Image (cartoon, rainbow, N blue to C red):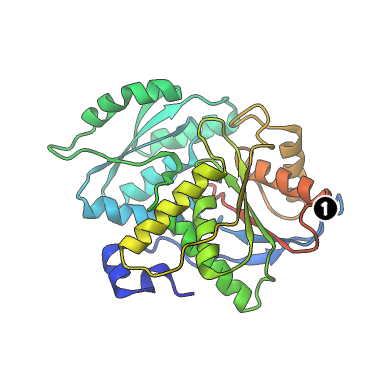
Amino acid sequence: MPHLHEWSPALRQSLPHLVLGDAPTPVRELPAFADGVNGIWLKDESGFGNGGWGGNKVRKLEWLLPDVKRRKRKTILTFGGLGTNWGLATALYAREMGIHTALALIDQPRDEHVEAQLERLRASGATIHFTRSKNRTVLLAPWLVARHMSGPRPPYVLPSGGSSPLGALGYVETAFEIAAQVKSGELPEPGYVVVPAGSGGTAAGLALGFAIAGLPVQTVGVIVTEHLKLDDAAIGRLARKSAALLRERGADFPEPQLNLEMTGQWLGDGYGTPTAESERAIELTRQSGLELDPVYTAKAMAALLARSRAGDFGSRPVLFINTNGPR
Ligand SMILES: Cc1ncc(COP(=O)(O)O)c(C=O)c1O
């Protein structure tokens, strides 16, 4: 499968893409876990991004930042929790292109991890609005837009996690990359690909990309937040909007058959609140040489380990995507 932007001249012209990280990102088999789970492969996105940090956020920004530029917007307005990785990646990568970022942040449980992240957000130069809850953010939205006008131009408004149909293209491309790694023999064909879902763009993009590439793999999105609707229907809709965007811009492919399962079973008490399983997953995975973050990847790995132990994945290899790219 060619890179998305090399797919057709029309696509390249109408969907500008900025290279912000080195691809393909590496894949490797994890050593057997201490509790006996094996056959788990890792695609490590943690080093993706200039300076080797950013993870899955940067894949989306590769498509989003050129669009911000093309529309001549000076400010991005986007959303997240107090410890938003997405907000930090946006603020820092946009700043390099002379674009300012404004963040509207809702509360999440404050721990050391979140306090450290807030410090980084403050240092990033982003304007921060503590809007506290989703409802207050919605009520304040017109004020936020007015506050961040640059002359006649409104800010470029991005949903939390950058999971717009355009942002999700980052993971359509990553699915093509995985298909190429399977083809070259670097990676056995996985039966399942497990990812955390915070706003769903990663899961939607992967499911669409695998469908287009013809790789019969099931994308399992492990929901880590109660603030957004991230069920099969919602993520399927996002994937189909990305497909429509590609088609509008000249890509030609049959109606994609999405093989996608979103599960909310591992969320526990909510976004940012650890569970016994996620804490155990951090410990077990550390012994395999991989550092998980508590909010996203730990819950996804908890789901993977439990389902693997239960025999849900059969004998097919399982691919875990490490979406975290800590700074
Ligand atoms: C480490 C990590 N994993 C996963 C996600 C969620 O990805 P998505 O928003 O595409 O569902 C995020 C979002 O910020 C993240 O920081």
Name the residue: 54% across, 63% down: 211
Residue 298 placement (x, y as % from top left): 67, 43
Side of 317 relative to 4 (left or right): right
From the image, tell me which residue sits under label 1: 311
Tell me if residue 260 comes above or below residue 17 in the rendering. above
Q: Position of residue 296 (x, y in %)?
A: 60, 42
Q: Is the CB atom of the residue marked by disc 1 within 8 angstroms of ligand 1's nearest atom?
A: no
Q: Is residue 143 visible?
A: yes
Q: How many marks?
A: 1
- Could you say which is closer to the camera, residue 23 or residue 303? 303
The kind of secondary structure element at disc 1 is loop
Residue drawn 61% across the image and 77% down it = 183
Q: Is residue 31 left or right of residue 171?
A: right
Asked whether the viewer can see residue 24, the reply is no
Q: What is the x, y in percent for residue 321?
A: 61, 55
Please identify the quarter of the rendering in which residue 110 is found. Answer: top right
Using the image as rendered, state which of residue 304 and residue 93 is in the foreground: 304
Between 278 and 176, the one nearer to me in the picture: 176
Name which residue lies at 22% across and 55% down: 70
Above or below — where is 216 with respect to 108? Answer: below
